[in-house]
């Protein structure tokens, strides 16, 4: 595998030569645009609307729009000036507890490994301490013309560098009108018991190998069959009977998921749910 970045990992005065590899192998199904009449691939060209001609790469520059039909040209020298530190240095700013970063901040992930024997010992020492103390390194690097915030964690003899979103990139939940509806909703105690039983019945360990991209796999089978002049039949999933009542849906869901022996719903809640009608207002609980 080819490294996508080489440089140095700095922790105060300790410097370690490192390399970065992609941790995710994303191979989405890609399509070419074809001329329907003859099947020829369509070429996309850069055309100047003023001069009405195709441009070469040498004639194209970066431009930042700051107003209607107003752009400022940004050169490679401008990009270099914006870097406060060399682009080949990952600077560790501090160490934090592993659980401090909310999942919403995580973006891409890459493997971080020592580059040669020169920094291998220092890398191993930091790796060991971070693992034993359950610490994550918070770092910054200028990469791909952008300053990246990184969360670096030890993993199976290497480190994983997660790129993090900056707070300014996160859309505040307060901008979503429906965000407060769940908090204001009056909860039916009987429904809450059944919902808790349903969650308990469906609880278990995360086994990544149990999951796959079924859609892409099926689409590839369809494409292979068409290429061979055949037809790949996809059996549609049987539609389940619709349940109008929330309480009825909860009751049936708990019954189905409980067959695996993961948990049981209190009989009192099941009996109360069976007596309920769709959209009926919650009843007060009776004393036993």
Image (spheres, grey):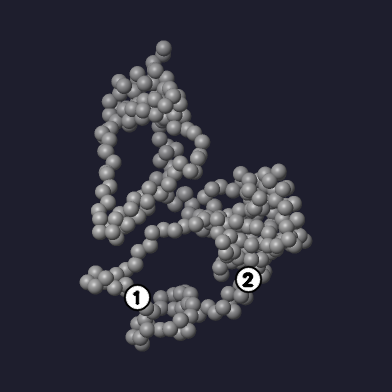
Residue 83 location, quadrant: bottom right
Q: Is residue 275 left or right of residue 92?
A: left
Task: Give the labeled residue for mark 1.
Answer: 43
Query: How far apart, in angstroms, are the residues tagged by discs 1 and 2?
Result: 36 Å
Q: Nearer the viewer, residue 131 or 105?
A: 131
Q: Is residue 47 visible?
A: yes
Quadrant in the picture for residue 196: top left
Residue 278 vs residue 87, the one in the foreground: 87
In the rendered structure, find residue 83 and report the number of the disc placed on it: 2
- Image coordinates of residue 110 in percent, x first then y, are 57, 57
Mark 2, secondary structure of its residue = loop
| Image position of 164 with respect to 199: above or below | below
Which one is nearer the viewer's eye here, 43 or 58? 43
Q: Earlier in the sequence, mark 1 or mark 2?
A: 1
Question: Which quarter of the rendered picture does the C terminus lie within?
Answer: top left
Name the quadrant containing residue 192: top left
Q: Is residue 164 visible?
A: no
Identify the residue shown where x is 49% and y is 52%: 172
């Amino acid at each position: 595998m080819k490294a996508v970045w080489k440089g140095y990992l700095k922790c105060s005065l300790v410097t370690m030569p490192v390399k970065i590899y992609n941790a995710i192998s994303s191979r989405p199904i890609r399509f070419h645009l074809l001329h329907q009449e003859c099947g020829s691939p369509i070429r996309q060209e850069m055309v100047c609307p003023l001069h009405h001609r195709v441009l070469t790469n040498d004639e194209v520059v970066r431009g930042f729009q700051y107003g209607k039909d107003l752009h400022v040209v940004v050169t490679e020298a401008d990009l270099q000036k914006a870097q406060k530190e060399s682009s080949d240095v990952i600077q560790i700013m501090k160490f934090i507890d592993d659980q401090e970063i909310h999942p919403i901040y995580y973006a891409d992930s890459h493997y971080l490994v020592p580059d040669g024997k020169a920094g291998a010992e220092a890398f191993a020492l930091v790796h060991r301490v971070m693992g034993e103390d359950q610490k994550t390194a918070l770092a910054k690097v200028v990469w791909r013309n952008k300053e990246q915030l990184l969360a670096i964690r030890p993993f199976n003899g290497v480190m994983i560098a997660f790129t993090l979103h900056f707070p300014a990139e996160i859309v505040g939940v307060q901008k979503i009108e429906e965000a407060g509806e769940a908090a204001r909703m009056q909860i039916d105690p009987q429904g809450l018991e059944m919902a808790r039983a349903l969650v308990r019945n469906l609880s278990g360990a995360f086994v990544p190998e149990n999951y796959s991209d079924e859609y892409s796999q099926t689409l590839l089978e369809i494409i292979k069959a068409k290429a061979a002049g055949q037809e790949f039949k996809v059996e549609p999933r049987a539609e389940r009977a619709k349940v109008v009542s929330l309480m009825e849906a909860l009751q049936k869901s708990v019954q189905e998921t409980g067959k695996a022996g993961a948990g049981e719903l209190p009989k009192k809640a099941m009996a109360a749910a069976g007596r309920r009608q769709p959209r009926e207002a919650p009843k007060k609980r009776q004393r036993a």
